Image (cartoon, helix red, strand yellow):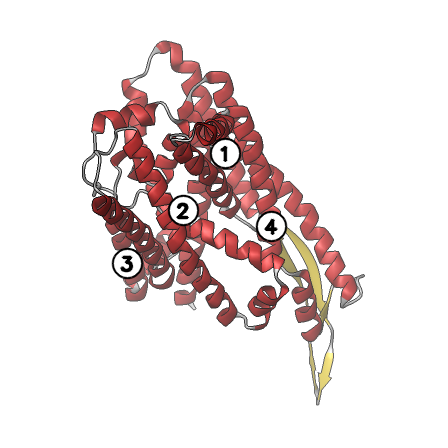
C-alpha cells in the first residue's frame, strides 16, 4: 500500500504525467460528448422497440458507448478503423512485400501500414453508415429524408467515426495507453450505470439465481484474465563471454519472457468486428425490394442471431485471431537473429535455425492455451445466456474481458512512466 501511495504521489507531482493523464481524460470526455449528439429525425419509441428485439444491435450499442441507442454522430465507434486494420494485417500475411516492408523498415514501415489502415477506414465507415441509416429508415426509426439529407447524414456519421479514430491516435501519442482500446473501454463503462439501474429496477426474487450466476461469472472472468495476462513462459538465455583487451564481457544469464497471451484483448475486438460486419450487411439487405435477396439476407441474419451458432463462430474467430495476431507481432526468426548478433544463445539449443524452431514451438504451445482461454471466456456468457435466456449476462462477460485487459494494460503503462521518473 505504501509503495502504491508513493507512485501516486509521483504521478501527481510530475508535470508530464499530469499532462498525459489530463489529455487522456479530456479526450474521453470529448468522446462522451460526441456520443450524446444525435442525428436528426429520430423516433425514440421505434428505436427502443428495435433495440429491445435485436440482440446484435444491443451488443453493438455496448461497444459504441450507447451510440446506437441515441443514434449519435459517432454511432459507428472505432469499428471501421478496427476492420480496416484487420484487412491490412491480413494483406501483410498474404503479400511478402508488405511483410518485408514492416520488418525491414521498422517503425517507418509500421507507420505506412497504419496510414493504409486510415485510408481503408474511410470507405468502410461510409458503407457502414449507409447500411445503418438505410436500416433505421426502413424500420421508421429515422424519418424519411431527401437524397441530399441522406447524403449529409452519411457524411456526418462517417466523419464521426474518423474523428474517433483521430482522437484514439492522439491518446496513444500524447496520453497514456492504447487510444482505440481506451475508447472501447470508455464506451463500455459509460453504459454500466444504466445497466446496473435496470438490474435493480427489474429485480425479482425469482431472478436471484441468474443475478448470482452473473456475479460468479464476472468474478471468475476478472480473476482468470488477471492470471492469464500476467502468466509467462521464461526461456533461459546466456550471453557468451567475450574478451576485449584486458576486460571480459558477457557470461551472464537472463531469460526471454514469452507471455501466455501475447495478443491481449485484440482477438476479442477483431472477432467482434468481423462477426458484426456480416450482420450489418444482412440486416440492410433483408429489406430489399428483391424477394430473393431479402429472403437470403434474412436467413443469414437469423443464422448469425442464433445464440449457439453465434457462440461457435465467436469461439472460432477468437481462437484464429489469437494465433494470427501472435504471428504478426512475434517473429521467432527475428528474435533468433537478434540473439545471435548479441552473442546470446539458449542453453542446449544451437543458434540460428534451431533457435528459431525452438522458439516457434514454445510460442505455438503457449498460444494454444491462451487462445483456448480467450475463446472459452468469450463464449461462456453466451452459453449461459442460452440456458438462462438473460441477454445482459452475455454482454457482461465480453465487456468484463475487455475492461479488465484494458485496465491492466493501462496500469502497466502508468507504472512504466512512473519508473522512468524514479530513475
Question: To which residue does mark 4 refer?
Answer: 324
Mark 2, Cα crowd under 10 Å, few <14 / some 14-19 / many 20+, is many
Foreground mark, 1 or 2, reads 2
Q: Which mark's residue is nearer the viewer, 4 or 1?
A: 4
Q: Earlier in the sequence, mark 3 or mark 4?
A: 3
What residue is at 60 percent from the left and 41 percent from the top? 319
The percent position of residue 89, horizontal first and vertical second, equals: 54, 56
Q: Which residue lies furthest to the left in this view?
A: 41
Q: Check whether the beta carbons of the residues at disc 3 and disc 4 lie within 8 A of each other.
A: no
Can you see residue 158? yes
Residue 163 drawn above or below residue 40: below
Assess disc 4: are there few (<14), some (14-19) or many (≥20) residues with their C-alpha within 10 Å of its C-alpha.
Answer: some
Q: Mark 2 or mark 3: which is in front?
A: 2
Residue 305 vs residue 34, the one in the foreground: 305
Q: CA separation, marks 4 and 2?
A: 19 Å
Instruction: Give the tally of numbered discs.
Output: 4
Question: Which is nearer the eye, 49 or 294?
Answer: 294
Mark 3 element type: helix
Q: Mark 1 points at which residue?
A: 221
* CA–CA distance in space, label 1 to label 2: 24 Å
Left or right: residue 312 compared with residue 125: right
Q: Specify which label sits upstream in the sequence, 1 or 2.
A: 2
Q: Position of residue 140 (x, y in %)?
A: 26, 29
The residue lying toward the viewer, choosing from 372 and 217, is: 372
Q: Which mark is residue 23?
A: 3
Label whose residue precedes the other's in the sequence (3 or 1):
3
What residue would you read off at disc 2? Answer: 79
From the viewer's perspective, is the residue at label 4 or at label 2 nearer? 2
The mark nearer the N terminus, 2 or 3, is 3
Amino acid at each position: 500500500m505504501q509503495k502504491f501511495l508513493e507512485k501516486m504521489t509521483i504521478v501527481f507531482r510530475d508535470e508530464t504525467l499530469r499532462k498525459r493523464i489530463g489529455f487522456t481524460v479530456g479526450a474521453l470526455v470529448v468522446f462522451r460528448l460526441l456520443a450524446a449528439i444525435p442525428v436528426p429525425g429520430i423516433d425514440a419509441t421505434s428505436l427502443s422497440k428495435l433495440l429491445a428485439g435485436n440482440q446484435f444491435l444491443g451488443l453493438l450499442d455496448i461497444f459504441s458507448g450507447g451510440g446506437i441507442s441515441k443514434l449519435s454522430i459517432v454511432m459507428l465507434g472505432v469499428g471501421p478503423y478496427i476492420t480496416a486494420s484487420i484487412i491490412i494485417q491480413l494483406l501483410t500475411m498474404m503479400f511478402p512485400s508488405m511483410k518485408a516492408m514492416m520488418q525491414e523498415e521498422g517503425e517507418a514501415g509500421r507507420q505506412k501500414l497504419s496510414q493504409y489502415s486510415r485510408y481503408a477506414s474511410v470507405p468502410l465507415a461510409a458503407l457502414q453508415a449507409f447500411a445503418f441509416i438505410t436500416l433505421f429508415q426502413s424500420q421508421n426509426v429515422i424519418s424519411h429524408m431527401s437524397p441530399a439529407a441522406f447524403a449529409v447524414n452519411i457524411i456526418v456519421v462517417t466523419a464521426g467515426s474518423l474523428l474517433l479514430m483521430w482522437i484514439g491516435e492522439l491518446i496513444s501519442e500524447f496520453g497514456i495507453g492504447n487510444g482505440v482500446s481506451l475508447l472501447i473501454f470508455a464506451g463500455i463503462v459509460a453504459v454500466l450505470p444504466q445497466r446496473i439501474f435496470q438490474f435493480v429496477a427489474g429485480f425479482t426474487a425469482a431472478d436471484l439465481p441468474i443475478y448470482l450466476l452473473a456475479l460468479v461469472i464476472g468474478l471468475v472472468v476478472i480473476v482468470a484474465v488477471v492470471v492469464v495476462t500476467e502468466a509467462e513462459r521464461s526461456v533461459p538465455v546466456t550471453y557468451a563471454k567475450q574478451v576485449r583487451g584486458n576486460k571480459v564481457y558477457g557470461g551472464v544469464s537472463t531469460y526471454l519472457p514469452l507471455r501466455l497471451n501475447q495478443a491481449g484483448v485484440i482477438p476479442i475486438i477483431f472477432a467482434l468486428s468481423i462477426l458484426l460486419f456480416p450482420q450489418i450487411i444482412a440486416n440492410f439487405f433483408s429489406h430489399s425490394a428483391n424477394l430473393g435477396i431479402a429472403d437470403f439476407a434474412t436467413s443469414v441474419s437469423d443464422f448469425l442471431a442464433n445464440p449457439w451458432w453465434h457462440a461457435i463462430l465467436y469461439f472460432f474467430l477468437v481462437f484464429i485471431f489469437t494465433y494470427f495476431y501472435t504471428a504478426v507481432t512475434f517473429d521467432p526468426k527475428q528474435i533468433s537473429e537478434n540473439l545471435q548478433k548479441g552473442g546470446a544463445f539458449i542453453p542446449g539449443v544451437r543458434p540460428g535455425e534451431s533457435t528459431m524452431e525452438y522458439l516457434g514451438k514454445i510460442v505455438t504451445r503457449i498460444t494454444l492455451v491462451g487462445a483456448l482461454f480467450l475463446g472459452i471466456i468469450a463464449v461462456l456468457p453466451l452459453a449461459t445466456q442460452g440456458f438462462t435466456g438473460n441477454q445482459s449476462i452475455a454482454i457482461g462477460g465480453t465487456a468484463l474481458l475487455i475492461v479488465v485487459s484494458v485496465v491492466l494494460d493501462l496500469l502497466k503503462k502508468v507504472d512504466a512512466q512512473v519508473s522512468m521518473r524514479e530513475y
